[in-house]
Image (cartoon, grey):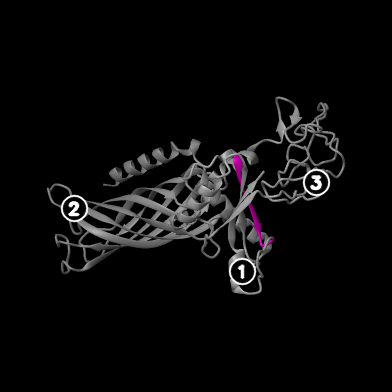
Amino acid sequence: MQMRLWKYVLLSTVLSLSFVGQLIAENRMAAYTVTPMVGYHMMDGALKIEDGASVGVAAGYNVDRNWTVEADLRYTPTEAANSSTDDVDVWTLGLGGLYHFQPTEPLVPYLSFGLGGMIYDFDGTSHNDEDYMGYYGGGFKYSLDDRIALRLDLKHILDARKDSKLSTHDDKDWRHHLQAMLGLTFQLSGYTSTPAQEARTAQPLFDEQSQTTSIDSAVSPVALGDDGDSDSDGDGVLNAQDRCPETAPGVRVTSSGCPSDTDMDGVLDFQDACIDTPQGATVDQQGCEEAVEEVASLTLNILFGFDKAQVTPFHYGELSKAADFIGRFPNNRVVVEGHTDNVGDAAYNRKLSQQRAENVLKVLIEKYRIDADRISAIGFGPDQPVASNANEPGQSKNRRVEISILP
């Protein structure tokens, strides 16, 4: 029995390791997850079946950063109590959901629930018991690196027994099982921002082939000196790793030693008078946001849950209206603007409004086929109210998403 169990453990491990080279972790939206697990199954005391070690695997899809839809299969090879010959294979198959708390932190607690079935396979006989079951539970995920998370899962299973082959109680009784499993969760693909912004963020500051910076061609590297252990320009990056070894004193640099552009607006920090302009904003030569006259605008009636940013099918009516509005201006640039009221921290509200705008942008691109090259998202937080924040009616008007058409 134990030898057979370890064969399944080895198989699960090999299958999980085969994914490592191409997986990424962090609770990412639209990511597929795979979780091989090992653990222990405590049987209901009314069943004449021994407790036993279990193996399993779960496959899921992250609807957003908080919600995951998941199916899991678990297998417990054991035997009937007081018997050395009547082996029993117990299978559980569930389909349900996981809700993650603080999904951007290294330690992520979650709750789980769902429905499914249980199968009791009695070796040496043609008899199988097949029952319906429901479950609830919870656990924790802990990020080990940028690809993998350790997962502890606890589950209470309610087994609706429909026969009494191995039961000491009435057939109508519910049977209660407990499962504790430990596994590794791998995430495939997914995203934390819009594809255009991820590509922009991933763009290297320094182009190794052309030997020039990708942000400002006026900043050019100088040949490295012979002494790779020294720091000739005093920027904190040794010459051996410094792509720009003659940076002026006091200039903020990246890990490669070249001048940085914190807000990624195309103006280097030492030349930028507005170092924290929103992503996607149009800026002048000093790095400050330009006032661009709108051609037209549309305010969407999209109500997000408190502290939530996900777009749901309930919003599709307004987004269809937005798509029709954008379609009237096929040659213009489009900006999705997120706004909040002034309740809470302003920096956090700007981040939340950016997430809401990005999620709306994603749906407009993927569902309504808006050209991704001409649409961008900006979160203004509480900075551009259209009504007073002194009362709830005004705050409600300020919590909005707008579509702006630019020249």
Q: Nearer the viewer, mark 1 or mark 3?
A: 1
Label 1 with label 2: CB-CB less than 8 Å = no
Q: Residue furthest bottom?
A: 391
Q: Residue furthest right?
A: 249
Residue 25 visible in the displayed image: no
> Would you identify the image quadrant in which residue 94 lies?
bottom left
Give coordinates of residue 76: x percent, y percent: 28, 51
Report the side of 11 relative to 356 (left or right): left
In which quadrant of the rendered view does residue 255 lie?
top right
Mark 1 closeness class: few <14, some 14–19, many ≥20 residues within 10 Å = many
Q: Toward the viewer: 217 or 74? A: 217
Q: Position of residue 335 (x, y in %)?
A: 62, 48
| In the image: residue 87, left or right of residue 95 | left
Residue topped by disc 3: 272
Residue designated by label 1: 395
Real-space Cα separation, disc 1 to disc 2, in angstroms: 70 Å
Whether 378 is among the magenta residues is: yes
Q: Amino acid at mark 2?
A: Ser
Per the image, label 2 sits on a secondary structure element best described as: loop
Marks 2/3: CA–CA distance: 78 Å
Q: Residues within 10 Å of mark 3 (few under 14, many from 20)?
A: many
Amino acid type, callout 1: Gln
**Disc 2 + disc 3, Cβ < 8 Å:** no
Residue in the foreground of this view, choosing between 13 and 398: 398
Local SS, label 1: helix
Distance in Å between CA atoms under marks 1 and 3: 33 Å
Asked if residue 403 is positioned above or below residue 374 in the image, the reply reads below
Q: Which residues are magenta?
A: 374-383
